[in-house]
Each structure stands twice: as C-alpha cells, then as structure tokens.
Amino acid sequence: MPARLPGSAAARPPSAAIGASAPLAARMRPQSLDEFVGQVSVIGPGSVLRQAVEAQQLPSLILWGPPGSGKTTLAMLLAAMTRADFEPVSAVTAGVADLRQIVGRARERRRAGRRTVLFIDEIHRFNKAQQDAVLPHVESGLVQLLGATTENPSFEVNAALLSRARVVRLEALDIEDLRAVVRRALADSERGLGGRGVSLDPEAEDRLLTLAGGDARVALDALELASVAVTRRRGRSVGVADVEGALQSPTLLYDKAGDQHYWLISAFIKSIRGSDPDASIYWLARMLEAGEDPLFVARRLVILAAEDVGLADPQALSVAVAAQQAAHFVGMPEGYLPLSEATLYLAMAPKSNSALRAYGAARQDVLDTLNQPVPLHLRNAVTALGREMGFGAGYRYAHDEPEGVATQQHLPDQLAGRRYYQPGTRGAEAEIAKRLEELRARLRGEG
C-alpha cells in the first residue's frame, strides 16, 4: 500500500494514536460502531447508513447535533470502516488554501486507488466562498464530505452543497446512553479508569448524568476530574459532592441565534397555548437562566396574549403588557417575577384564537378583492364637493340610534354580509358570542 501522504490520517480506529496523557473523553472514543453509544436509528444494526458503510459505500454527510453527541467520533469511525484517509479541518481556523492542499493530496490518492474523507468540523462557520471551494470536489467524488455542525444546516450550509449531502440528525445522549459510557470508562483498565480503585456512588452517578446534559464529553471530563480529587485524598469512592465540585457551573445548552433559541421559545409558547403551567414555567426558567433577553420573552407573551388567549380573557393582554413594562423597569434578576406571573396567568387562561382567525379571513378578502370602494355614506364629507357627490349622505350616527347600534352597511358592497369574527365558546367569549348575535340581528334590521 502507498505511503500515507502528509497532513492526513490513515484509516484507523479513532483512539488508536491517543496517548495515556490525553483526556479521558479522548481515550474512551469508541474504536468501532459496536462501541458507539446512542444514535441507534442513524447507525444501529440494520440502519441504511450502517448497511451502506459495511458495503464500503459512504455518502457525503452533514452530521447535525448538539455538543457531545458523537459527531466527530462517528465521522472518524465511518472513514476507518471504509478504509479512507481522514482529512480533518476546523472551519474556525482553516481557509481556502488549506482546502486546496487537501484536494491536491486527494488527487494523488485517487491515482493510487485510495479514497479521501474530508471532515469539516463546525462547517456552519465556513463562509460562502469556502463552501463553494469544496463543492466541485464533492460533486466529482474526489472527496467524501463529512461535515459536523451544531446549527441547522438548512440555514447555515449552501443549498448547492446541502443538495449533495445527506443530513443526519444526532440527538443528545439520553441518561441510559450516558450511563453506559460512564460505566465503560470506570471498567476499562487500558483506556479508562479501571484498575485505579475508584468507584462511583449510585447517587453521584445519577447526579453526574443529570448535570452532563446529554453530553458524553462533559460526563467523562467531570468523572476524570472528580476521580483525581478522590485519589489525591486517598479515597476510593466518588460522591455527589465530588461530582458537583467537578461541575461547579454546568452550562445550559443555549445559543441566542441558534437552534436552542428557537426550540425553547417554541416549547414555551406551545406549553402556554396548551394550558400547561408547569411546563410553561420550566421553559421560562430554561431560557432566563441560560441568559435569554427577558424582553424577548416579554414580547412573545404579549403576542401570545392576543393570539392564543384573546377575547376568551380580555384582561390577558393587559397582564402581558404590564409584565413587559415591569420586566423592563425592574431588569434582571428580579425581572423573572412579572414574567413568571404573566406566564402562569396566560397558561391558566381560557384560550381563543378568534382574533387571529378574524384578521386572517379579512386579510384574505383584502388580497382577493383589492381596492373595494368605501360606501358613500361612510366617507368623510369635509368638503362641499364631497357633499355634492353624496359623501356622508344617509350616515346614521350610532349614539343617536336605539341601543347605540346603527343599522347600516359598513362593509364594501362586494363584501356585504361577510362574517369574519367567529367567537369561541370559552371564558368571556361565550358572553361575547351572545352579544354578537344580538348586534348582527340589529345590523340586519331584525332587532
């Protein structure tokens, strides 16, 4: 077999060249797909991707998932399984010149009958020019692209490049997946902590898995740090205090411009709309504790009060606006109080989207019928010419009418009789519905 070219990694298990001084997370990288934990639907036995790789076929992939979900490890394993040379670059530090060098090496390998996998970590940080530089070589098959990103590739990767790659969604590891990772590290005497006489209390294990937040790297790094502390004091068992000391400031996964921002606000809104106060207050806390702008949350509450509560509780909008003003006036950290009150109020309020539906129906008629003339009797007769043309003629002043209701047509002629507002039956809107029937009867001259 030809000698390996400079700058690349020959196909080999991900942890094969990692020394004993490397962090535990690096040492414990899976050496085969059988060791790879989680993502069963993506790469588990019988999956389409697993079968393709076992047949030595590797499509270009965009691996999209949160930190610690296994994106880099999976890319290395896929390259090793297909006996391809692995060319890793970081989008943070690499430029077009680096890509040209990799392409040159890939051409030499192709002549020798070897394949090249180009792995771009944080591919969402590549600008358009850098992504365009990769495109023709992916298209020609000179390199197989494996990109890793924590951001939605639909927004961050060029459409042309995205169309030539399959997006693979990786999820954060669940508690049991993390448990398997941690216990393997404790038992492995070659790469892990086995043979060092260190154990993990059951309560400490549960705490570690919870604080890791689905991130295997965080779990293993914290375990290693806690085990070092225990060993230095000549102890044998890692306790809850050791775990919490190793993870003194666990980080909430959040990005004000990324997926977590939109997913959390979506969960927050849908929980309030679904009348679940417990879930609503949880998502509020998730956002605020991660550093979300409280006024962004307040704006969403004002919108939701009008869109989802509406006339079922007309007071809801006032509560939301007051919460916005109070949060702005008070600021954080106490600003969470008015936001919490408004969140709970809106979650418990009866729901109606009649205002949204009414506007949507009226808007559609506006677009469908365009510039319908205002009826003459509704036009403002401020000039003699206007009055001569009949502006305002026959207008009935509501305050002079019985019950204050003017029995006249207010819509354009072409839309006369349209019913845009259809009240719901919940909360205050049930009474509004009765009032509306009386009003419409009077407007029809039936009252």
Image (spheres, rainbow, N blue to C red):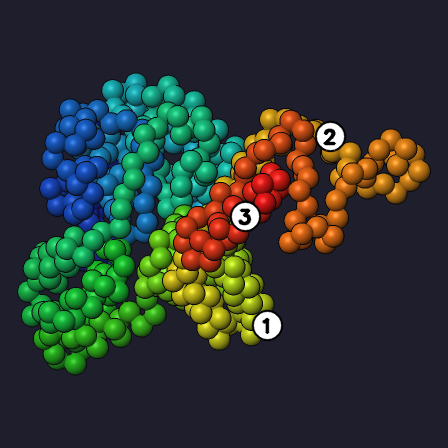
Q: CA distance from mark 1 to mark 3?
A: 43 Å
Q: Quadrant of residue 232?
A: bottom left
In the shown orientation, is residue 296 left or right of residue 379?
left
Sequence-earlier tag: 3 or 2: 2
Residue 445 at x, y = what percent? 62, 40
Give the labeled residue for mark 1: 329
In the shown orientation, is residue 276 left or right of residue 132?
left
Indicate the amino acid at tag 3.
Glu
Residue 165 at x, y = what percent? 35, 28
Looking at the rendered image, the disc whose residue lies closer to the viewer, 3 or 2, is 3
Indicate the amino acid at tag 1.
Phe
Q: Which mark is residue 373?
A: 2
Assess whether mark 3 and mark 1 are in contact (beta carbons under 8 angstroms): no
Q: Which quadrant is the N terminus positioned in?
A: top left
Work out which residue is located at the far front of the displayed protein and give it.
447
Give the labeled residue for mark 3: 438
Secondary structure found at label 2: loop
Sequence-earlier tag: 1 or 3: 1
Looking at the rendered image, the disc whose residue lies closer to the viewer, 1 or 2, is 2
Q: CA distance from mark 3 to mark 2?
A: 28 Å
Name which residue lies at 35% across and 63% down.
277
Residue 36 at x, y = what percent? 16, 45
Indicate the amino acid at tag 2.
Pro
From the viewer's side, name the closer residue of 188 and 326.
326
From the viewer's side, name the closer residue of 386 and 211.
386
Q: Which quadrant is the C terminus positioned in?
A: top right
Q: Quadrant of residue 191?
A: bottom left
Residue 131 at x, y = what percent? 46, 32
Q: CA distance from mark 1 to mark 2?
A: 46 Å
